[in-house]
């Protein structure tokens, strides 16, 4: 038979270039970094959910559902009561099933005799613990919000807000590693394939410059606005002309303030260790600390290493005033500055730190592109993940 006519073979695309060997360690480092960021994302998200649930539960338990103050109070108490009773029923039921194995009639009879009292117990428990939980939970929540280490973080709301910012920065870091950061790829699509790598290097370098500029600007703004460093100073002694304060002097001011913040943080933590057992036992957090107890606690640390002696002595109480009670919360000696949200200025450095990490991510991405371990195809970012 004559040979069948064969159509000419389709023109194949040029095969992708082989990855360079020098880029393999960088690729492994990038994959490891991405795994760390992914785990951190999961952990931060879990912490956010946990804090929000704890906050919602505590706020609901501070309301007396028997007086119709809040429907959420009813729902939360029902769920907690059913969870406790259900756990007891599960444990005891397993024991009953083990004992009644092989005796079906006795097993169902015992289960029925067991479940009915449990339901009655659940109803009695729900009615009896509602009023007592209001006082107990209110004392616990007020202590957390007004006189615990949580006040240094701006309460639960301030902490959740910073966790949200951290989560966004972690997501940006992962997106940069995968080449899925926000960008306009119209120019890249119009370029020839051989010109796409230089274009990616140029755009990545520009992104690094923007990130580094943001790091410097935000650090300077935080140091001036929140650590009270002087933005300008006289150019020379006696001069009226103002010059920008040297960065070293600004950082020295910030270092001093950070030392004071963490000293107060540690002192508040020591107070919390004294207060927490009393709060758990149901004792009012603001009714136990007498002037002698407060003065003894003040003398446990060297406050004069950070604050003037006159200001520290002003914190001491008259021990003859036996009726007075001191709130177990730290004050800043000699200043009207409150400790609420004090550590947020340190936590705010998460933003410039995150921008620095994104800049390094862009640098790693450039190296992976140059070593052919990452593609610059604009359609590749829309593919499925491995």
Image: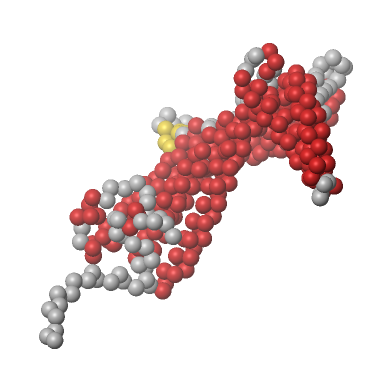
Q: Is residue 317 above or below residue 19?
A: above
Find the residue positioned furthest to the front: 105
Going 54% across and 37% down the picture, which residue do you hit?
162
Residue 235: image location, x then y, percent: 44, 36
Find the residue positioned furthest to the top: 67
Along the line of sight, which residue is nearer the eye, 90 or 311? 90
Quadrant of res 309: top right
Res. 310 in view: no
Going 12% across and 79% down the picture, which residue do you hit?
5
Q: Is residue 228 above or below residue 93?
A: above
Along the line of sight, which residue is nearer the eye, 140 or 384? 384
Going 70% across and 15% down the picture, which residue do you hit?
66
Q: Is residue 315 above or below residue 220?
A: above
Quadrant of res 18: bottom left
Where's the C terminus, which quadrant? bottom left
Residue 268: image location, x then y, percent: 72, 33
Res. 382 in view: yes
Going 23% across and 65% down the picture, which residue do you hit?
194
Q: Is residue 47 above or below residue 361?
A: above
Along the line of sight, which residue is nearer the eye, 236 or 113? 113
Residue 321: image location, x then y, percent: 85, 15
Residue 324: image location, x then y, percent: 81, 16
């Amino acid at each position: 038979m004559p040979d069948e006519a064969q159509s000419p073979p389709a023109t194949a695309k040029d095969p992708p270039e082989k990855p360079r060997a020098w880029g393999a360690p960088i690729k492994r480092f990038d994959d490891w970094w991405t795994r760390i960021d992914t785990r951190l994302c999961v952990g931060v998200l879990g912490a956010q959910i946990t804090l929000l649930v704890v906050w919602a539960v505590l706020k609901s338990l501070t309301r007396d559902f028997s007086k119709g103050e809040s429907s959420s109070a009813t729902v939360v108490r029902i769920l907690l009561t059913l969870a406790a009773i259900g756990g007891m029923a599960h444990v005891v039921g397993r024991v009953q099933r083990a004992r009644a194995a092989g005796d079906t009639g006795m097993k169902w009879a015992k289960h029925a005799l067991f479940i009915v009292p449990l339901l009655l117990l659940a109803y009695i428990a729900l009615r009896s613990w509602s009023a007592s939980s209001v006082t107990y939970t209110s004392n616990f929540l007020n202590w957390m919000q007004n006189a615990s280490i949580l006040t240094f973080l701006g309460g639960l709301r301030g902490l959740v807000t910073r966790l949200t910012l951290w989560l966004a920065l972690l997501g940006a870091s992962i997106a940069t590693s995968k080449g899925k950061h926000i960008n306009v790829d119209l120019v890249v699509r119009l370029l020839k394939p051989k010109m796409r790598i230089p274009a990616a290097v140029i755009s990545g370098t520009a992104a690094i410059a923007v990130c580094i500029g943001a790091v410097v600007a935000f650090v300077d703004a935080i140091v001036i606005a929140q650590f009270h460093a002087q933005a300008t100073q006289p150019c020379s002694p006696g001069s009226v002309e103002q010059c920008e304060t040297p960065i070293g002097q600004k950082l020295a001011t910030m270092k001093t303030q950070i030392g004071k913040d963490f000293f107060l943080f540690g002192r508040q933590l020591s107070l919390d260790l004294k207060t927490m057992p009393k709060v758990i036992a149901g004792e009012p957090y603001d009714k136990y600390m007498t002037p002698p107890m407060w003065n003894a606690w003040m003398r446990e640390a060297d406050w004069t290493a950070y604050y003037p002696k006159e200001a520290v002595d002003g914190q001491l109480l008259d021990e003859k005033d036996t009726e007075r009670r001191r709130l177990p919360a730290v004050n800043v000696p000699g200043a009207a500055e409150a400790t609420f949200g004090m550590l947020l200025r340190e936590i705010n450095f998460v933003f410039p730190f995150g921008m620095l990490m994104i800049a390094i991510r862009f640098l790693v991405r450039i190296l992976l592109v140059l070593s052919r371990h990452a593609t610059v195809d604009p359609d590749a970012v829309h593919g499925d993940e491995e």
